[in-house]
Image (spheres, rainbow, N blue to C red):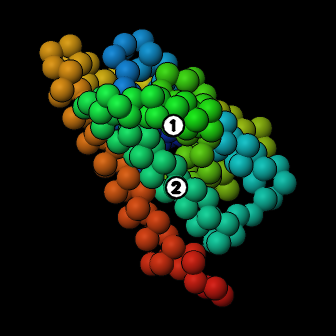
Amino acid sequence: MISFYSILCLGFFLGMRHATDADHVVAVTNIVSQQRSIRSVAWTGVLWGIGHSLTVFVVGAAIACFGFVISKRMGLSLDFSVAIMLILLGLLNLNAAFRCFGEVRENEAARAEENARLGRWLRFFSIGSPFRPLLIGVVHGLAGSAAVALLVLPLLRETAGAITYLLVFGAGTIVGMMLVTAAIAAPIRYAAEHSAGWHRVLGGLAGATSFCLGAFLVYQIGFVQKLFIAGS
């Protein structure tokens, strides 16, 4: 019994630690860089954590209940989806930052129409949409980095114990991400209140960082880990 509770405590703190992974922090920074309310930022962290935990729970439950196995190539493909997500977030933030720096008057109508069209295609990822952090969390939960939760499952012989562990890990991830987003939001809110220019610069830096990290992961997963190489 003591061992089981120890594993649950470990799962909660691993969930909190998992929330601080680089790709998670970069993704959330891109979301909160365009927000100024601490309440909305905290809610963003909660939604991201819920989406992430939902995916980990479904995959973990499939492993615990049905012996589902994720192949190496499938795992790399799921990691690759996170890289694409980071690139997309970076581009969206860069677009928002550069648009805020100023626009040519004669192109204002054309830009508005283009942004409206982009918004219709990417409405779930638009700034302020509650679906944006939720869906990003779901995609991140598909990545191999969530294996920290699944590695402990073989230690739990009973299915109920494994399900409980996954729930506790998810709770830790939600709490951890809420704290991370609050910490990130502090300097961003300060910049927003004292200098609109610096606020835009921070948004642009967040977008550039996300794009560069996503591009690096595409190279790392596609070529170094040989996802793009047939027969690997």
**Going 48% across and 48% down the picture, which residue do you hit?**
88
Residue 77 vs residue 159, the one in the foreground: 77
Front label number (1 vs 2) = 1
Mark 1 lies on residue? 114
> What is the residue that sits farthest to the bottom in this orientation?
231
> What is the residue that sits farthest to the front in this orientation?
106
Q: Residue 99's x, y, as percent?
A: 33, 33
Res 55 quadrant in image: top right
Res 52 quadrant in image: top right
In primary-sequence order, the first of circles 1 and 2 is: 2
Residue 215 seen in the current view: yes
Pointer 1 local density, CA inside 10 Å: few below 14, some 14–19, many at least 20: few
- Distance Cα–Cα, label 1 vs label 2: 22 Å
> Considering the image in quadrants, where does the N terminus appear?
top right
**Going 66% across and 51% down the picture, which residue do you hit?**
153
**From the viewer's perspective, is residue 96 above or below residue 38?**
below
Q: Label 2 is placed on what type of residue?
A: Ile
- State the mark number for residue 84: 2
- State the mark number for residue 175: none
